[in-house]
Image (cartoon, grey):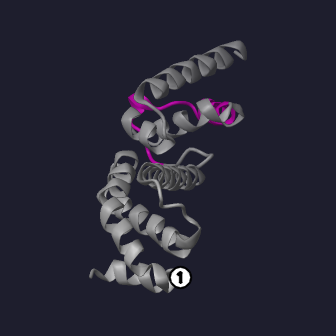
Amino acid sequence: MTALLALYLSVLDDRNFEEDFTEVYNTYKRLVYHTAYKIMDDSYLAEDMLQEVFLYVAKNFSKIHRENCHELAAYLVSCSRSRAYDMLRKQREELLEDVPNEPDAAPVPDDAAVSTDNIERLTELIGQMKPMYRDPLRLLAMGYTNREIAKSLGLTDEVVRTRLFRGRKLLWKEMNSHE
């Protein structure tokens, strides 16, 4: 018996179900792991999701309907997906909280220098944009690639490209309308 299985059995809501839980765990642990891995694209995070799902299942095992294996599998997949997406959403929110509103003071080569007034105006305009444009633009300004932005925001590469294009277009329009 693995240490994790022993942990799950220790929190089982009814000790009479130890054998049933062990069977469910051994039958569906790969399904839960692979479902989480497809979403998280990280084996360690998928393992965390596996543990979270089965801890929840163990704590509520007497309430979970196990008669129909297809319904149980669908339930476990649903739990895995929702927890994985929740984790991604939390990571994205944490990442966006770290995005500074002001430009950093790092020196810039002369040929890439932009006036301080323009930087302040751009920062102000980006801050006023809808989050769907603001968040990708801030991440792009921090040096993230489109693929990294897509992954951190839970979007496709194509959606990120479109939002960056439209966001830049809105910025350009605003910058030129006030000159």
Which sits in the foreground, 94 or 87?
87
Q: In which quadrant of the rendered view does residue 134 lie?
A: top right
- In this view, the residue in front, 72 or 149, is 72
Q: Residue at x 61, y 32 (%)?
A: 132
Q: Position of residue 87 (x, y in %)?
A: 51, 56
Asked if residue 45 is positioned above or below residue 113 in the image, the reply reads below
Occupied quadrant, residue 103: top right
Q: Is 35 in the magenta? A: no
114 in magenta: yes
Residue at 56%, 31% in the rendered image: 115
Q: Quadrant of the N terminus?
A: bottom left
Magenta range is 106-126
Q: Circle 1 sits on which residue? A: 14
Name the amino acid, label 1: Asp
x, y percentage for residue 167?
58, 23
Question: With 63 as the anchor, is 68 left or right in this view?
Answer: left
Q: Secondary structure at mark 1?
A: loop
Do we see residue 143 in this rendering? no
